[in-house]
Image (cartoon, rainbow, N blue to C red):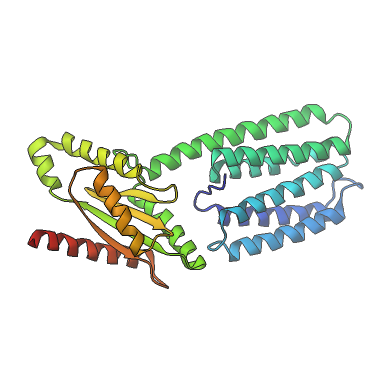
């Protein structure tokens, strides 16, 4: 439910800013004498403040704060629908509803997007029925269908693109770019909450020999087997990615150096292939690049030790 794709907070801040401007325009140039001018001014101030808050805290807000911001926008649209005096005024809110739906479809998981669309449709429909202008129902049904169809289409397209852009096609794991983006967020959260966070680099031993002696098909099959075997040993919060070639990488939130040893033992037991690990647990102020660099140094220290013995 709380999945949020990258970049959503900055765009939501922009949507809030545009909403503030539109509310100001609506208050200054009302479409009728019964337009809710006072409500428009209030919503303009709220949207402007929300835009600034989202922008200033865009790197620190968690997914639930973004869900709350979208729900707040839906509540504002419900109020405007209730206070609209004409059918044209109610249906004129359709583009704003579509914006919320398309945003949800693009940046949230499909389930979360459907929940948000359901909420906004319930709130605005209740508002429209309470306002009860004449002749609004056919136009309103068209608006509802448009919001649902566009949100569902955006959700499917974005989901397919996001998975394709972030997935290693051979193993089905996160690719390097997707892993780094997720690990950056995980490390930032761990540093805010003072929780341990560990990164593990894994390099296969003798992988070139597998390709040379048994062919690249055998090498690909080995990578797929390892990805499946290791994934079965991980928690939902852990993220295994393919870092490139025969290198894998793990991010382990809530895991310190002592607990990593138990996990590595389970990974060794899950498949007979030989490999070497390098681990690094975050220190205060660490960046992901620094963390990965320490894990890489530890990896090659372990490989040299194995070679020497």
* Whether residue 175 is situated above or below residue 260 in the rendered picture: above
For the point 30% across and 58% down, the residue is 261
Front one among 26 and 9: 9
Drawn side of residue 116 relative to residue 295, left or right: right
- The residue furthest top is 138
- The residue furthest bottom is 284
Q: Residue 68 appears at what percent x and percent y?
A: 66, 52
Q: Residue 282 appears at what percent x and percent y?
A: 38, 67
Q: Residue 227 appears at what percent x and percent y?
A: 30, 42
Q: Quadrant of the C terminus?
A: bottom left
Q: State which quadrant residue 196 falls in.
A: bottom left
* Whether residue 199 is situated above or below residue 133 in the rendered picture: below
Say if residue 159 shows up in the picture.
Answer: yes
Drawn side of residue 175 relative to residue 151, left or right: left
Q: State which quadrant residue 197 falls in.
A: bottom left
Say if residue 92 shows up in the picture.
Answer: no
Q: Residue 109 appears at what percent x and percent y?
A: 54, 42
For the point 13% across and 63% down, the residue is 305
Q: Quadrant of the N terminus?
A: top right
* Whether residue 116 is situated above or below residue 302 in the rendered picture: above
- The mark total stands at 0
For the point 55% across and 63% down, the residue is 60
For the point 75% across and 48% down, the residue is 75
Drawn side of residue 19 relative to residue 286, left or right: right
Front one among 151 and 110: 110
């Amino acid at each position: 439910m709380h999945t949020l794709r990258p970049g959503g907070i900055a765009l939501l801040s922009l949507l809030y800013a545009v909403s503030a401007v539109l509310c100001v325009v609506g208050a200054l140039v009302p479409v009728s004498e019964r337009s809710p001018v006072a409500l428009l001014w209030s919503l303009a101030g709220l949207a402007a403040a929300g835009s600034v808050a989202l922008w200033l805290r865009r790197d620190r807000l968690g997914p639930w704060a973004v869900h709350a911001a979208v729900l707040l926008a839906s509540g504002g649209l419900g109020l405007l629908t209730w206070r609209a005096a004409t059918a044209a005024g109610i249906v004129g809110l359709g583009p704003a509803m579509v914006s919320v739906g398309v945003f949800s479809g693009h940046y949230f998981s499909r389930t979360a997007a459907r929940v948000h669309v359901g909420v906004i449709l319930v709130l605005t429909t209740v508002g429209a029925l309470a306002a009860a202008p004449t002749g609004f129902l056919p136009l309103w049904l068209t608006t509802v269908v448009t919001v649902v169809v566009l949100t569902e289409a955006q959700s499917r397209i974005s989901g397919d693109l996001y998975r394709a852009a972030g997935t290693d096609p051979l193993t089905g794991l996160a690719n390097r770019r997707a892993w780094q983006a997720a690990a950056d967020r995980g490390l930032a959260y761990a540093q805010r909450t003072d929780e341990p966070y560990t990164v593990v680099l894994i390099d296969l031993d003798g992988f070139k020999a597998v390709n040379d002696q048994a062919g690249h098909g055998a090498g690909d099959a080995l990578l797929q087997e390892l990805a499946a075997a290791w994934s079965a040993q991980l928690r939902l919060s852990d993220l295994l990615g393919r870092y490139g070639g025969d290198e894998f990488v793990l991010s382990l939130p809530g895991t310190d150096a002592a607990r990593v040893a138990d996990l590595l033992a389970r990974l060794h037991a899950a498949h007979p292939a030989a490999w070497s690990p390098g681990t690094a647990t975050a220190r205060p102020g660490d960046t992901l690049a620094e963390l990965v660099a320490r894990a890489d140094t530890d990896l090659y220290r372990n490989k040299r030790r194995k070679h020497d013995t």
